[in-house]
Amino acid sequence: MGFLFGKKETVQAKAEVLEDGREITNREMSRLKYNEYHGKEPMLEIGVRIEPDCQVPYEAKMKAGLSLTFLLVPGVWVQVKYEAGKKERVELDDTAQAILDRNPQLAKKE
C-alpha cells in the first residue's frame, strides 16, 4: 500500500507576477473575519505567468503567504513550485531576500 502515498514530484520554475499583491492583501484584510484573527498565516492567490524550462509559459494563480505579498507587484519575478502534472496548484517557493535580490526595482531609491 505504500506505493499509493509516495512522495509527489515537485517542479520549480520562474514566474512573473501579474496582479498587485498589495491590493489583494488590502481587499482581503478588510473582510470582517480578520478583525480579530488568531490563526495560521492567511494564504492569498495572486495571478502569475509561469515559465517552466523547455515548456510553453502559462498563467495560473499562485498561493502566497500574507507576509510576502507586499513584494508581489506586477513585473516582479519569483520562484514557484507545483506538482508535476498539476500545473494549477502553484505555490510561492521564495524568500523575501531572494525576491529582493532578483528584482532590483523593488529596492528603495535614495
Image (cartoon, rainbow, N blue to C red):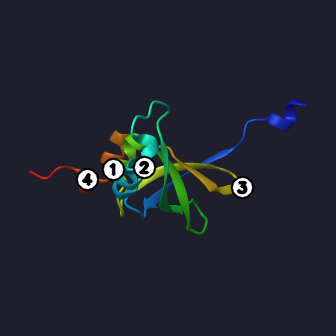
**Reading the chain from its start, which is encountered first: label 3 or label 1?**
1
Q: Is residue 60 visible?
A: yes
Q: Could you tell me how far apart the alpha carbons at marks 2 and 4 are, in whole angstroms? A: 28 Å
| Residue type, mark 1 in image | Leu
Earlier residue among tags 1 and 2: 2
Asked if disc 3 and disc 4 are in contact, CB closer than 8 Å, the reply is no
The quadrant in which the N terminus is found is top right
Q: Residue type at mark 4?
A: Leu
Residues at badges 1 and 2 in contact (C-beta under 8 Å)?
Answer: no
Residue at 53 percent of width and 61 percent of height:
50
Residue at the spot x=55%, y=67% of the render? 57
Q: In whole angstroms, how far apart are the C-alphas of marks 1 and 2?
A: 21 Å
**Mark 1 touching mark 4, by CB under 8 A?**
yes
Whichever of labels 3 and 4 marks the residue nearer the N terminus, that label is 3
Disc 2/disc 3 C-alpha distance (Å): 34 Å
Q: Rate crowding at label 4 as few (under 14), some (14 to 19) or many (20 or more) other CA atoms within 10 Å.
A: some
Measured in 3D between alpha carbons, the distance from the residue under mark 3 to the one under mark 4, in whole angstroms, is 33 Å
Mark 2, Cα crowd under 10 Å, few <14 / some 14-19 / many 20+, is few
Reading the image, the residue beneath label 2 is: 31
The one of 36 and 94 positioned closer to us in this rendering = 36
Residue 20: where, in percent of width, then height? 37, 60
Which residue, given by chain and number where applicable, does mark 4 sit on?
A: 106
Q: Position of residue 109 (x, y in %)?
A: 13, 53
